[in-house]
Amino acid sequence: MLSFTEENYLKAIYHLSDGGLKSVLTNEIAESIQTKPASVTDMVKKLALKNLITYEKYHGVKVTRQGKSQALAIIRKHRLWETFLVEKLGFDWGEVHDVAEQLEHIQSPLLIEKLDEFLGFPSADPHGHPIPDKNGKITIARQITLLEATEKKAIIRSVKDSSASFLDYLSKVGIYIGATVQVMERLAFDGSLEIKIDGKKKVYISREAGENILVTQ
Amino acid sequence: MLSFTEENYLKAIYHLSDGGLKSVLTNEIAESIQTKPASVTDMVKKLALKNLITYEKYHGVKVTRQGKSQALAIIRKHRLWETFLVEKLGFDWGEVHDVAEQLEHIQSPLLIEKLDEFLGFPSADPHGHPIPDKNGKITIARQITLLEATEKKAIIRSVKDSSASFLDYLSKVGIYIGATVQVMERLAFDGSLEIKIDGKKKVYISREAGENILVTQ
DNA sequence: TATAAAGTTTAGATTAGTCTAAAAATTTAT
DNA sequence: ATAAATTTTTAGACTAATCTAAACTTTATA
């Protein structure tokens, strides 16, 4: 069984590797969990010994099949708890992360099964992120353009137009891959959209921009 | 803020002291949290330094006003979580303790307030133990005889007849101060009671015995 | 392609919590 | 009242996780 700390490292590595695709460097891990590179080196050796990641000195780490499966179990717990906090306890979806970060380490498979059932087996958390099932399987939603999105929350996945000028525009207004957005209103006049980014900032984007942004819901 | 471990020591000391009344000895603490006396000595020094207990070498410890207040906050969390697990998630009341033991350490005052509200501000957990309010106040239920108890769970508090023979009888059948019992049936024939002890053992006790056992509900 | 810069690892120290074994204090029993 | 038994504390060691500073690799640059 993993310690609280080992779980945090594994989850961070999994996220930084885009779900096990890329390999991840020491400094990235250190920055993402607010620790020093030397500490990361120590810990990745330990995780490698447990076959959760493969580690090549000076060249970063990759999650193994086992590591991926354990990371997904933690992510599943995190997202189920976030859903509980928002849907049942009435938290605002911006204030649940820190608490879910604690709750995700509770060890009880039965608890998670029962919580899942109590929540009606949700497929996404309040931020729109998919909740892996008991076997770690993630049901990936079809990508649609922001223009086609309903008024529920959506996650930015990619762009059709990847010209520097468009990417520059997106970063200026605060839209980035992984952001949670919500279409608040569509203006009949020119088809432009009023969207909320990460529950805070409201911006207007044109119809053309909306057609070039791909999201999942 | 207290660590996970400090919280466990404080809670154990509070319980062993009968809510801050008696002082508690090193070996009792060691046994109750499955550790060695030497470790207890180290930890009580630390808790004393934080003014949560007073410690007199070789003569045990007492909880301070502050310590009591913090212990009650932990107990409140534990009992609210137990209530949640049973009432909302459908756990059996015998299988919630270990999970609640983990959940009680989650740090978020807001979470506990919202959980309390979600549960309808319960005054007792599924075992019948009172849940301290936000200020640590425990509403003590009136003591009644087991004969007068309803079919909800009840906690054994004391006995009217404290003769050795009666106490011996009680220990033989498995009834002790603090046990959770539930009257399952009253036999019309002689007024004897069928009771369940700690959710497991079923025993029959006479009308006379029932009249001499005091409980709260 | 040699060298500087950046990134990573190692070595050694630190803190929290635990343990064993030995020493000290207290309690019990004679 | 003193010796024996019990309880508690101290001393010193160990593990997990962290850190700093120095050494080492890799990458970028000139």
Image (spheres, coloured by chain):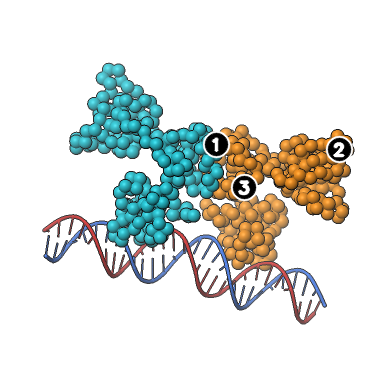
Chain colours: A orange, B cyan, C red, D blue
Q: Earlier in the sequence, mark 2 or mark 3?
A: 3
Name which of mark 1 and mark 3 comes first in the sequence: 3
Q: Residue furthest top?
A: B189
Amino acid type, residue under disc 3 in the picture: His
Question: What is the chain letter for disc 3?
Answer: A
Please tell me the numbered disc located at residue A191: 2
Seen from the viewer's position, the closer of residues B86 and A13 is B86
Q: Nearer the viewer, mark 1 or mark 3?
A: 3
Tag 1 residue: A114
The secondary structure type at the circle numbered 1 is helix
Chain ID, mark 2: A
Position of residue D29 measured from the top left corner of the image (x, y, whole percent): 80, 73
Q: Is residue B32 left or right of residue A11?
A: left
**Residue under numbered circle 3:** A97
At which x and y percent is residue A51? Answer: 59, 56
Amino acid marked by disc 1:
Lys
Tell me the kind of residue under disc 2. Answer: Gly
Quadrant for the C terminus of chain B, please: top left
Callout 2: SS: loop
Residue occupying the point 30% across, 25% down: B147
Helix, strand or loop status at disc 3: helix
Where A14 sits versus B216, above or below?
below
